[in-house]
């Protein structure tokens, strides 16, 4: 009367309450395709090694193929009593093909099975997130190309500092997202390891051939220690950590877009299709998409902390605590993908208010350093030049003028070394154009940066 797959040792069924509590089918059903592909590869290996008969393997493989089609057509009702996706599918298989189905789990445990499924799943998802990041980089590169000459203030402490260009600003994010892709790639290498063959914890007595399973499923390597193979969730932590950084980058970008779309900045205007209104205030146009992405960073950080905390006290090997890894991982994948998917077209469609950017760059003494550098060129020690320009700025603030509006006489009252070539030296465009150093904002330097980034994207 005990109905569980593992019921032999039990006198009673689990309480319904416990079924509800420990069942993971409500969320791990998303692994069905990977579970089926893994089981098919396992069955083929069992037959090849003479552990089950070839006809049995054939029945298993085709039975699983039918189950896959049924699940995809929405014809399968999963059961909470069968606990998780692994036992649900095994049960469906046995119902469908009879005795051969009962041989599938030979030389395997759910412990190595679940590790396998999640690794297969994550490899696919890493590829998708990587694709979204590449798409975003391409969009930013196109925008950067358009805005090589769009001068804007660069900030430190959110105070206007020195002039840069919007292209240069976008390219800073391209660097961040390129590092994110590298991190994903690196994490993918460690995800790409087959755990099957580890069994429950101590391998198996059957003459299995993990290398053949790895070859069928496209794994680059086979786990080297059975205890580690079923206990290791490092690859998930690494992925969620990489995702957390992606969210940091997105969130910083979102914060800037939110600021820039305020009337106080008015550097950009989001497209109507990527903004929302207010139920009460008729005039409002809100950057909700950017705000929500900024907010969602928090849940990904939470998942990272959740995973680390779940793992930190676990003795080897598998412990049921580890079932908690999946919701954290799945929600991280969903969140990052959703944010990237909506962010790219939001940036691509926002209107850039070049004039306001240029005005802000001209208005905030962002050329003060250039004036000091100019004086250095005329033999004034930098520290003295700095003090002279500081006094000039103070004078300008009192007069309500910008540096370029001063007369030569006014300049010379504070800095006698000034000549009439000063106006060219502190022209905002010149200030940008002179910063040709590698990684600098000069249009030619940024054009080279764009070319390097495009080449890197192509070679990936
Ligand atoms: N549903 C389980 C999980 O997600 C599968 C592995 C269960 N293994 C076990 N011995 N209870 O981790």
Image (cartoon, rainbow, N blue to C red):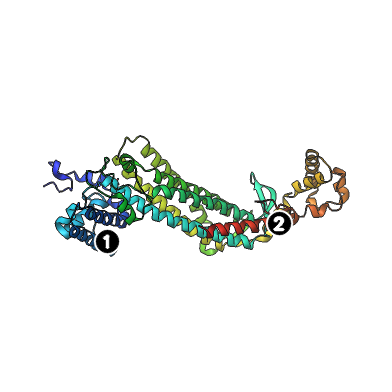
Residue ID at (53%, 50%): 179
In this picture, residue 282 sits left or right of residue 25? right
Q: Position of residue 236 (x, y in %)?
A: 39, 46
Say whether residue 287 is visible.
yes
Q: Is residue 275 visible?
A: no
User: Secondary structure beneath disc 1?
Assistant: helix
Q: Residue at x 25, y 51 (%)?
A: 86
The answer to which of 192 and 344 lies nearer the viewer is: 192
Disc on the earlier residue, 2 or 1: 1
- Confirm or reject: label 1 Cβ below 8 Å from ligand 1: no
What is the quadrant of residue 148 in the picture?
bottom right
Q: Residue at x 22, y 43 (%)?
A: 205
- Dot label at residue 367: none
The residue pinned by badge 2 equals 359
Q: Nearer the viewer, residue 432 or 19?
A: 432
Q: Nearer the viewer, mark 2 or mark 1?
A: 1
Q: Position of residue 243 (x, y in %)?
A: 46, 49
Q: What's the residue at 40%, 45% (across, down)?
A: 235
Q: As drawn, is 344 to the left or to the right of 414?
A: left
Tell me the CA gap for discs 2 and 1: 61 Å
Q: Is residue 289 above or below residue 10?
A: below
Mark 1 neighbour density, 10 Å: few (under 14) some (14–19) many (20 or more): many
**Taking the image as four quarters, which one is ligand 1 found in?**
top left
Above or below for 111 versus 289: above
Q: Which mark is residue 68?
A: 1
**Numbered disc 2: secondary structure:** helix
Does 409 sit left or right of 140 as displayed? Answer: right
Across and down, in percent, residue 171 comes to 60, 55
The crowd level at tag 2 (other Cα within 10 Å; few <14, some 14-19, many 20+) is few
């Amino acid at each position: 009367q005990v109905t569980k797959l593992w019921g032999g040792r039990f006198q009673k069924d689990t309480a319904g309450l416990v079924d509800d509590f420990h069942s993971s089918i409500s969320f791990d059903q998303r692994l069905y395709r990977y579970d089926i592909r893994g089981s098919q590869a396992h069955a083929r290996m069992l037959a090849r090694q003479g552990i089950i008969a070839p006809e049995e393997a054939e029945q298993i493989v085709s039975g699983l193929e039918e189950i896959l089609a049924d699940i995809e057509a929405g014809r399968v009702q999963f059961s909470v009593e069968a606990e998780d996706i692994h036992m649900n599918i095994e049960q469906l298989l046995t119902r469908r093909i009879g005795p051969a189905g009962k041989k599938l789990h030979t030389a395997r445990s759910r412990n190595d099975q679940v590790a396998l499924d999640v690794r297969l799943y994550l490899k696919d998802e890493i590829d998708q997130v990587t694709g979204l990041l590449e798409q975003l980089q391409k969009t930013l590169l196109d925008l950067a190309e358009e805005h090589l000459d769009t001068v804007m203030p660069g900030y430190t402490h959110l105070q206007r500092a020195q002039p840069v260009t919007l292209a240069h600003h976008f390219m800073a994010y391209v660097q961040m997202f390129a590092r994110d892709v590298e991190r994903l790639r690196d994490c993918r290498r460690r995800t790409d390891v087959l755990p099957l063959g580890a069994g429950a914890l101590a391998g198996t007595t059957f003459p299995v051939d993990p290398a053949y399973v790895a070859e069928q499923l496209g794994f680059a390597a086979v786990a080297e220690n059975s205890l580690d193979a079923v206990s290791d969730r490092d690859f998930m932590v690494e992925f969620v950590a990489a995702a957390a950084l992606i969210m940091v980058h997105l969130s910083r970008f979102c914060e800037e877009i939110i600021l820039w779309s305020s009337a106080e900045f008015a550097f950009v205007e989001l497209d109507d299709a990527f903004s929302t209104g207010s139920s009460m205030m008729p005039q409002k146009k809100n950057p909700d998409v950017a705000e929500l992405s900024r907010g969602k960073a928090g849940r990904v950080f939470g998942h990272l902390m959740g995973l680390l905390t779940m793992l930190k006290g676990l003795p080897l090997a598998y412990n049921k605590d580890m079932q908690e890894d999946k919701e954290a991982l799945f929600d991280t994948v969903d969140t990052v993908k959703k944010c990237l998917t909506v962010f790219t077209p939001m940036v691509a469609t926002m209107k850039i208010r070049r004039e306001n950017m240029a005005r802000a760059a001209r208005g905030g003494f962002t050329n003060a350093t250039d004036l000091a550098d100019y004086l250095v060129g005329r033999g004034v020690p930098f520290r003295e030049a700095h003090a002279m320009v500081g006094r000039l700025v103070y004078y300008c603030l009192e007069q309500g003028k910008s540096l370029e509006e001063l007369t030569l006489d006014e300049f010379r009252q504070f800095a006698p070394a000034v000549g009439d070539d000063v106006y060219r030296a502190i022209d905002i465009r010149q200030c940008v154009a002179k910063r040709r150093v590698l990684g600098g904002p000069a249009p030619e330097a940024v054009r080279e940066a764009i070319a390097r980034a495009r080449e890197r994207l192509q070679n990936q």
